[in-house]
Amino acid sequence: MVSHDDMKDLFINPVTATSIAEYFFNEHEPQITNEDWVNSNSLLIHDRGAEFWLSELLNAFTAPLVESKSNPVSPYGTITISQSLKDLAPYIDREDWLAANVKLIGEIGGSEWLWRLLNILETGTVVALEHDEG
């Protein structure tokens, strides 16, 4: 059975809506702590709006390395993304992902959403929905 929290994580996982550049999966030293990244991006979400910020996040995942390194929205300087997410193909329309996550940020708050995002990306934890054939 899939919990309510598992469903949130399914929506948050950006791999479902975009490809992620190879360099995100290569081991690299963090330049900023997770806490600092969450705090600064919580402010950006508040100042710029969730939809704009989420769109920038998806763009950061496919941008050239030099752009991701200098983009405060990009989690590149904070974490290395788990290899288990590397070969997953997007299957959710970008606009649907944006709409679902704008709503979810409104429900759980920017900080909670950002912590969940980092956890998903670092651990590669993706809940698979089981098809009930009954």
Image (cartoon, rainbow, N blue to C red):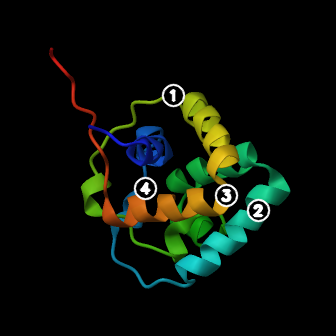
Going by the numbered disc 2, the residue's amino acid type is: Leu
Secondary-structure class at tag 1:
loop
Residue 70: name its quadrant: bottom right
Secondary-structure class at tag 3:
helix
Which residue is at 51% across, 51% downward? Answer: 62
Residue position marked by numbered label 2 in the rendering: 44
Whichever of labels 3 and 1 marks the residue nearer the N terminus, that label is 1
From the viewer's perspective, is the residue at label 4 or at label 2 nearer? 2
Whichever of labels 3 and 4 marks the residue nearer the N terminus, that label is 4
- Observer-nearest residue: 10 or 55? 10
Whichever of labels 1 and 4 marks the residue nearer the N terminus, that label is 4
Residue position marked by numbered label 3 in the rendering: 110
Going by the numbered disc 4, the residue's amino acid type is: Ala
Whichever of labels 3 and 2 marks the residue nearer the N terminus, that label is 2
Residue position marked by numbered label 1 in the rendering: 93
The alpha-carbon separation of the residues under discs 3 and 4 comes to 24 Å
Going by the numbered disc 1, the residue's amino acid type is: Asp
From the viewer's perspective, is the residue at label 3 or at label 1 nearer? 3
Which residue is at 69% across, 66% downward? Answer: 41
Q: Is residue 5 left or right of residue 75?
A: left
Whichever of labels 4 and 2 marks the residue nearer the N terminus, that label is 4
Going by the numbered disc 3, the residue's amino acid type is: Gly
Query: Which quarter shows the N terminus?
Result: top left
